[in-house]
Amino acid sequence: MKPAPFAYAKARSLDHAIDLLAQDEARILAGGQSLIATLNMRLSRPALLVDINGLDGLDEISRENGGLKIGALVRHVKAEGSTEIAQYAPLIALAMPHIGHPAIRNRGTVGGSIAFADPAAELPACLLALAGEVEIAGPQGRRIVHADHFFKGLFETALAPHDVLASIRVPAATAATRVGFAEFARRHGDYAMVGLAACARAQGDTLADIRLVYFGVGSVAARARNAERSLAGGDVEGAVAALPADLHPSEDLQASAAVKAHLAGVLLRRVAKQLASPRIEGIAP
Ligand SMILES: Cc1cc2nc3c(=O)[nH]c(=O)nc-3n(C[C@H](O)[C@H](O)[C@H](O)COP(=O)(O)OP(=O)(O)OC[C@H]3O[C@@H](n4cnc5c(N)ncnc54)[C@H](O)[C@@H]3O)c2cc1C
């Protein structure tokens, strides 16, 4: 199928993009890896595509105020090869190879993944696990929204129609940071049937500030707070047993609710091992 007719405008600056978005039914075009598919299937029919590719300053990765800032237009392939991300956001480094296939990672952007907020996508879950923030540029200026308040529901975020997601920021990992990531997908690169992104802080022999974020199990990536409490006490099997109170997976085209619930426990055991380890293989310390 071909998309319904639409107009196209190339934004010259962030302010220009925000002005263009004031028009009815205008949508941002970033990497196009999700948007173009929805246009072709006529699942969305925007009147105007506002192309933000090439906007200055949105494709940089930089250290800022004890954190790491990743511009919205950083492509997945750049994030995957970034030494700053490997060192200061190792959870994102672990997740990147699971996003689609190389052709998708060559074009898809970090900002596009966060803005699209697919419930089975890796990066929204990582942002939530890292207690990161989203920088939004809108008609009233810039604002920062914590990840806890950014993801609202199925493909729904705190972004208003005239907003541009400018960057995400995550706290920089320290020697005490522990991360874990695992997912089940039918084939490597497919969206996850169930996935788990986790972050914690080592405190002597125990873990504190644990954030276990599941994706692919509901309408939005979500923390498993009961399991977090058990894991903080070092009780991995208790954490697995607590999952039914946290997760209520619904059946989808990939798996039944029962299979998803079972896989969630399997992933938790794997990720708990990773969290207990100060080094993740392949990731710079
Ligand atoms: C075959 C296939 C497999 C895939 N597998 C995976 C996978 O396993 N995991 C995964 O996470 N993703 C997967 N993707 C999606 C891919 O990661 C996309 O890159 C991503 O979802 C969207 O990024 P994009 O830059 O392409 O955004 P676009 O497609 O350009 O835009 C997506 C949406 O976000 C909005 N948007 C984009 N950028 C901004 C911004 N800066 N501010 C505000 N709104 C914005 C757009 O208006 C649009 O509504 C897959 C895609 C394909 C085609």
Image (cartoon, grey):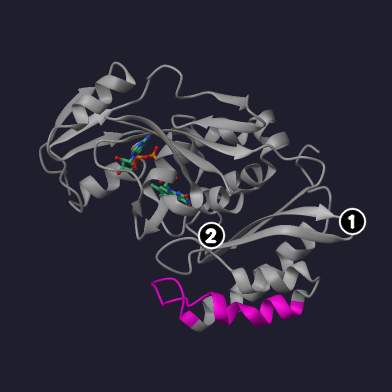
Q: Which residues are magenta?
A: 237-257
Residue sitting at x 55%, y 75%: 246
Q: Is residue 100 visible?
A: no
Residue 194: x and y in percent read 54, 66
Q: Residues within 10 Å of mark 2 (few under 14, many from 20)?
A: few
Residue 98 location in percent, x, y? Answer: 57, 50
Identify the amino acid type marked 2: Arg
Relative to 212, is 278 on the left or the right? right
Identify the amino acid type marked 1. Gly
Relative to 173, is 53 on the left or the right? Answer: left
Q: Residue at x 36, y 25 (%)?
A: 53
Q: In this orientation, which residue lies closer to the viewer: 83 or 165?
A: 165
Residue bearing the label numbered 2: 187
Count of marks overlaid on the render: 2
Do the residues bearing badges 1 and 2 touch, measured as CB atoms within 8 Å?
Answer: no
Is 228 a magenta residue?
A: no
- Residue corresponding to mark 1: 204
